Image (cartoon, helix red, strand yellow):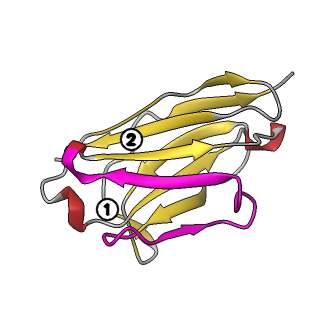
Amino acid sequence: QVQVVESGGGSVPPGGSLTISCAASAIHFKIYRIAWYRQAPGQERELVAQISSDEVPEYADSVKGRFTISRDNARNTVYLQMNSLKPEDTADYYCNSPYGSITVWPWGQGTQVTVSS
């Protein structure tokens, strides 16, 4: 079974930057589309960025121009670089592999990002 481990979260002031990572033990990692999701307290989980197997990124409107998703298939790792962070970016961040309306991997423990002065 695939194991997913997110890391790199922390607390930053508004306007700050942070890069979070997701390592997955999936065999043939490179064939998967991978996405970053986030869930704020009391809200539903939302998809914020995804990257295809041929490294084409897509972003939610709320993060477009501020976040960059990338992948390193040799390390089975996906990154999310977050710039110009806003308080509304505060959430637990998770990664998974979307397939239509479902996700393929078990959910990891997530990594917490807090944007506050």
Q: Which residue is mark 2?
A: 22
* Residue 61 image offset from top left, x and y in percent: 73, 67
Q: Which residue is mark 1?
A: 104
- SS at circle 2: strand
Disc 2 marks which amino acid? Cys
Rendered position, 76 above or below 51: above
- SS at circle 1: loop
Residue beneath the point at 74% across and 31% down: 16
Between discs 1 and 2, the one toward the N terminus: 2
* Residue 100 image offset from top left, x and y in percent: 42, 78
Q: Is residue 46 magenta?
A: no
CB atoms at circles 1 and 2 under 8 Å apart? no
Neighbour class for label 2 at 10 Å: few (<14), some, many (≥20)? many
Question: Range of the magenta residues?
Answer: 52-74
Give the CA distance from mark 1 to mark 2.
15 Å
The quadrant of the rendering that contains the C terminus is top right
Q: How many marks?
A: 2
Residue beneath the point at 77% across and 42% down: 84
Q: In the rendered view, does 101 fall on the left or right side of 43?
A: left
Residue 13 is drawn in which quadrant?
Answer: top right
Residue lying at the far right of the rendered structure: 117
Residue beneath the point at 66% across and 65% down: 60
Q: In the rendered view, does 44 fall on the left or right side of 28?
A: right
